[in-house]
Image: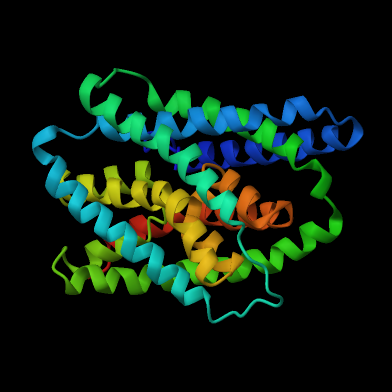
């Protein structure tokens, strides 16, 4: 997720409110006047956003640490994604909705290329950029163009339904995180408290990583950062496949965790349709408000 640890909770709330207001405001504008050419800009914003986040991650890791960090981080993120999605399948979806095979291939190329390119450039060049500021600006641009692009789906009925659906996704996030934390502990990734803090980060890597670094070590902080980062990034590649195996929008949104309100939101709009955009935003915003409160409290547990 885009948020930086240097921001306080009030600033995070302000950013979330701004994001939602831009999304809703330009959604209403799209209802009044629809220009299809503008909707195409949304894809460009997404490509740039994924590249920037990947560039940040690649720039923050040294070559010597890369192999062990990436191994544990990729393995951990895959565990979280699979476990969380599996937990959500207890809610059976009505109908026989399926993910379009063409969209799966499209996503793998569209989002995979900027993801890999950002990592490569970050590792080699390591540019000194104010990443948090840059990504914040890109996310606000995303709110503008995504709101305009999904304006046709905005209605009171959809918003009401999103509150209920978002609550289910939140429950899946928490249960999936807790189970994943236990698994991390059992395979030797750290103490139970440490692994639960890492998983309860719910994709918010720039908050969880520095928090773990401060109270444990930079190495574990890097693992916390990358596990939550890969949870976000690998969602673009794995979720289309999981949705093909067993379609469940609640599980898909839960996998994104706190990022479902912003960086993975385009993924849900494409895979699940505009009806689930508000559900994803509600789930992500709720997690965004509570994670900065809940994780520090977990540090005080025995």
> Residue 277, how many percent across, how many down?
67, 52
Q: How is the image coloured?
A: rainbow
Left or right: residue 98 versus residue 183 is: right
Report which quarter residue 86 is drawn in.
bottom left
Image quarter (top left, top right, bottom left or bottom right) of the N terminus: top left
Q: Is residue 178 above or below residue 138?
A: below
- Please identify the residue farthest to the front as the structure is shown: 102
Report which quarter residue 145 is drawn in.
top right
The residue sitting at 60% across, 60% down in the picture is: 99
Left or right: residue 114 versus residue 110 is: left
Q: Which of 15 and 55 is in front in this view?
A: 55
Quick check: can you spot residue 59? yes
Q: Which of 281 and 46 is in front in this view?
A: 46
Left or right: residue 228 versus residue 185 is: right
Quick check: can you spot residue 140? no
The residue sitting at 51% across, 31% down in the picture is: 47
- Image label count: 0
Q: Is residue 57 above or below residue 193?
A: above
Q: Nearer the viewer, residue 248 or 168?
A: 248
The residue sitting at 85% across, 56% down in the picture is: 156
Image quarter (top left, top right, bottom left or bottom right) of the C terminus: bottom left
The residue sitting at 16% across, 64% down in the picture is: 190
> Residue 3, how many percent across, how many down?
44, 38
Report which quarter residue 157 is drawn in.
bottom right
Left or right: residue 293 versus residue 279 is: left
> Residue 92, how many percent across, how many down?
61, 80
- Please identify the residue farthest to the left as the structure is shown: 64
> Residue 243, how many percent across, how many down?
54, 64
């Amino acid at each position: 997720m885009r948020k930086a640890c240097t921001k306080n909770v009030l600033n995070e709330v302000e950013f979330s409110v701004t994001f939602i207001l831009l999304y809703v405001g330009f959604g209403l504008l799209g209802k009044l006047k629809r220009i299809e050419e503008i909707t195409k800009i949304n894809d460009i914003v997404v490509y740039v956003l994924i590249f920037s986040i990947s560039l940040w991650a690649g720039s923050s890791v040294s070559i010597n640490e890369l192999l062990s960090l990436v191994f544990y981080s990729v393995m951990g993120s895959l565990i979280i994604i699979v476990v969380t999605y599996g937990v959500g399948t207890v809610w059976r979806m009505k109908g026989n909705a399926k993910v379009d095979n063409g969209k799966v291939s499209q996503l793998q190329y569209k989002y995979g290329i900027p993801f890999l390119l950002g990592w490569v450039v970050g590792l080699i060049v390591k540019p000194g950029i104010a990443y948090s500021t840059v990504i914040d600006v890109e996310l606000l641009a995303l709110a503008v163009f995504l709101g305009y692009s999904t304006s046709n789906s905005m209605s009171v009925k959809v918003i009401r339904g999103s509150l209920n659906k978002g609550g289910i996704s939140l429950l899946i996030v928490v249960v999936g995180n807790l189970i994943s934390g236990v698994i991390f502990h059992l395979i030797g990734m750290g103490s139970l408290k440490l692994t639960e803090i890492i998983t309860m980060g719910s994709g918010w890597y720039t908050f969880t990583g520095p928090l773990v670094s401060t109270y444990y070590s930079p190495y574990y902080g890097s693992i916390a950062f990358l596990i939550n980062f890969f949870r976000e990034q690998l969602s673009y590649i794995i979720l289309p496949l999981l949705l093909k195996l067993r379609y469940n929008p609640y599980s898909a949104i839960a996998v994104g965790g706190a990022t479902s309100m912003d960086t993975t939101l385009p993924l849900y709009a494409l895979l699940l349709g505009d009806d689930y955009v508000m559900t994803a935003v509600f789930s992500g915003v709720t997690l965004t408000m509570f994670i900065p409160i809940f994780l520090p409290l977990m540090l005080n547990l025995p």
